[in-house]
Amino acid sequence: MFQDQRAFLRHLEEQGELRTLDVPIRVTRNDNELMALSRYLSINNVPAVKLTNLEGYNTPGVPVYIGNIGSRKRMCLALEVENWGEAKEKLAAAVKTPPESWPEPVIVDPGKAPCKEVIIRGDDIDLQTQVPKVWFGEEWSAMISDNVSVTRDPDTGTLNASALLHSFLDLQHDGTPYSEELRRRCLISYIFWKPPTGIHVAENYANAVKRGKPLEIAIASCIEPQLFIIGGGPRCPRGSHAWDKYAMVGALRGGPTEIVRCETVDLYVPATSEWVLEGEVLPDQELADYKHGNFLGYYNEYQLLPVTKINCITRRRDPIWHPSRSFMPPYDHGFLQLITIESEVLSYLRSGFPQVQDVVAYPSFGGRGMFYVVQLNVDAHEKPYAWFGHQIIHAVWGSPGRYGAVAKYVVVVGPDIDPYSLDEVIWALNTRVQPKSDTIFNDKGQVLYFDPSALATPQGNTVTSEQLGIDATFKLPERFTKLHQVPARPPKEAMEKIKAKVAPYLT
């Protein structure tokens, strides 16, 4: 169980999955190499890197790490398992664990919390020089990504701790700088609240706006990896536990998380965070953040979002920084999104349908996909009833979590189709599907915001989408009474035997 991100990085280094890179890397606005570097690491299965020679970097004494969870293997190391299947099962089991059995966090004395070794308050704060800023690609603003952002519902006091993006304020759209006060003390927070779209922090902010009051927030950055996975992944039902994801992650980690009370807000953050930014999301001020790479692989033109004023910074004495950005997959935290999608949908489906074997989201190399393949462990006459695949499709769209409801495409296959092989999935589509009778079309479905094919709101996000479900199982008994054409393919056991026999001579 990793107590902080540093322990995880040491583990990566011991496993040969982290190396130090001393070559100059450019990180400034309109002149940077981090998107290319991050993509190179993921595509080529290269270890993560510690960067010590950054050009144009505002905090040169703070080392930057890239690719910490940027591969399936490093995600498995973060979850302390051997392979992707085990990782998915472990996360799915944590999601299913009853909230009353989640370990409560341990509140530590502020004097013993590493995240409070340095404290900067009020007018002494300068975000431009005191917090690391690096750019990826053509994005307009540097951002804070690896974090849990903690808020409370102003109406009920319910705590929420979830990952959230925040961007620094540098230049306005016309190229002129923002005011000195905004640049030194404020961030733009990616809170989409018109409508809140089921995201707790957005609901909390909407409730604060109704009251005409700011929303207290604490941004705890560079945290231990399993909390980041839970914070940015599975939905924790509102009110299910007083400590929200601080308790939920205990079911995954097998032990409690250490937290500490903030200095200026009534909130709690992980005690071993590298950085904590305390402040308030203002109820009467929104600004546009331009050209931001999103998790679907496109640049957004703009988003109109709330402004957060920072009133206190606490950090470790010698902190580290882990930035990550979204762009065309694969990218670093895309593997976090991938495994949380698969485990959340798998966990929900299995709770009602033991016939569900696996769920795979595409793109399968990292990223928040909208194309899901559900593999059953039965097919043909073994299905419990006719058109069972159709019910599974509706179950995915009706799932209560963050992801199943926004699946644009759902394909259901039998146990002989490898859901990790698009070639096999497409073969099933070609040979087991009639395009009209074996499909379901939903023209008023949920949407994965930022989908560039859907109609956007004035805030820059989207609210509705069309959806397509495809039943690619054998149509017995729906259309046929017997399997009149048997697939001509070697069985799995034969493939494993021949691999063992010839692989030593062919690799």
Image: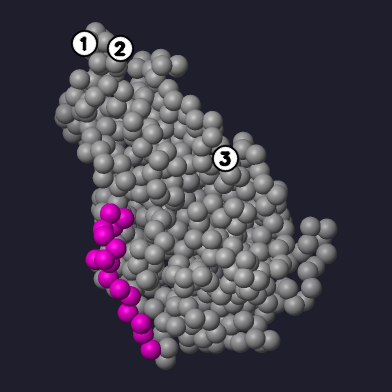
> Which is nearer the N-term, disc 3 or disc 1?
3
Q: Quadrant of the C terminus?
A: top left
> Residue at image x 44%, y 25%?
440
Of the two numbered discs 3 and 1 in the rendering, the one whose residue sits closer to the viewer: 3
- Quarter-of-image position of residue 202: bottom right
| Mark 1–mark 2 distance (CA, rounded to whole Å) | 9 Å
Colour mapping: one colour
- Quarter-of-image position of residue 462: top right
Looking at the image, residue 282 lies above or below residue 461: below
> Given contact means CB atoms under 8 Å apart, are the residues at marks 1 and 2 in contact?
no
Looking at the image, residue 330 lies above or below residue 7: above
Residue on which the image places disc 1: 482
> Which residue is nearer to you in this view: 18 or 449?
449
Q: Callout 3: helix, strand or loop?
A: loop
> Given contact means CB atoms under 8 Å apart, are the residues at marks 3 and 1 in contact?
no
Residue type beneath disc 2: Arg
Other-residue count near label 1 (Cα within 10 Å), few / some / many at <14 / 14–19 / ≥20: few
| Residue 464: numbered disc | 3
Q: Which residues are magenta?
A: 94-109
User: Would residue 500 be counted in the magenta stretch?
Assistant: no
Residue on which the image places disc 2: 479
> Which is nearer the N-term, disc 3 or disc 2?
3
Q: Callout 1: helix, strand or loop?
A: loop
| Residue 240 shows in this picture | yes
| Mark 3–mark 2 distance (CA, rounded to whole Å) | 34 Å
Residue type beneath disc 3: Thr
